[in-house]
Amino acid sequence: MATCQDCTHASTDPHWGGYHCSCGGCQVRALANGPQFWRSLKDRQRTPGYLAELVTVFGEEEAETGHKAVFAEYQRLKKLRGGTP
Ligand SMILES: [Zn+2]
């Protein structure tokens, strides 16, 4: 996975708001911070909007793999946020 300057910042700052649209890491982070993913967590099932985002970013074949990456990123960010007062 490509790493850009925004990914480097976001690795230590969970509130970092910069993204490179061509960067895989940023795309995963954008989805993990997105309203569709949040809604899917809240409803305990993937919303059609979130599924569409997964397919758009990762493609039909890789949507499941993509979701795992998004979920892992969500957990990483949550942990980072939990560590800051
Ligand atoms: Zn990036």
Image: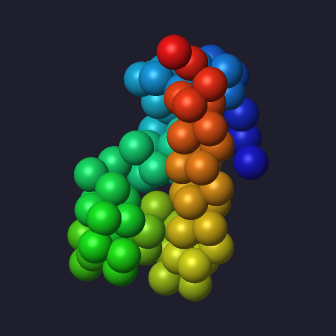
- Left or right, 15 with respect to 7, comes to left
Q: Position of residue 4 (x, y in %)?
A: 66, 27
Looking at the image, can residue 50 be seen? no
Q: Looking at the image, which residue is at 51% across and 15% down?
A: 85
Q: Nearer the viewer, residue 3 or 65?
A: 65
Say above or below: 38 vs 85.
below
Q: Position of residue 39 (x, y in %)?
A: 27, 62
Q: Quadrant of residue 80?
A: top right
Q: Quadrant of residue 2?
A: top right
Say above or below: 13 vs 78.
above
- Left or right, 63 with respect to 68, comes to left
Q: Position of residue 41 (x, y in %)?
A: 37, 65
Q: Looking at the image, which residue is at 56% across and 60% down?
A: 71
Q: Looking at the image, which residue is at 43% across and 73% down?
A: 55
Looking at the image, can residue 85 be seen? yes
Say above or below: 68 vs 84.
below
Q: Looking at the image, which residue is at 64% across and 56% down?
A: 72
Colour scheme in use? rainbow
Say above or below: 3 vs 9.
below
Outermost residue toward the bottom in this view: 61
Q: Position of residue 52 (x, y in %)?
A: 32, 73
Q: Nearer the viewer, residue 26 or 34?
A: 34
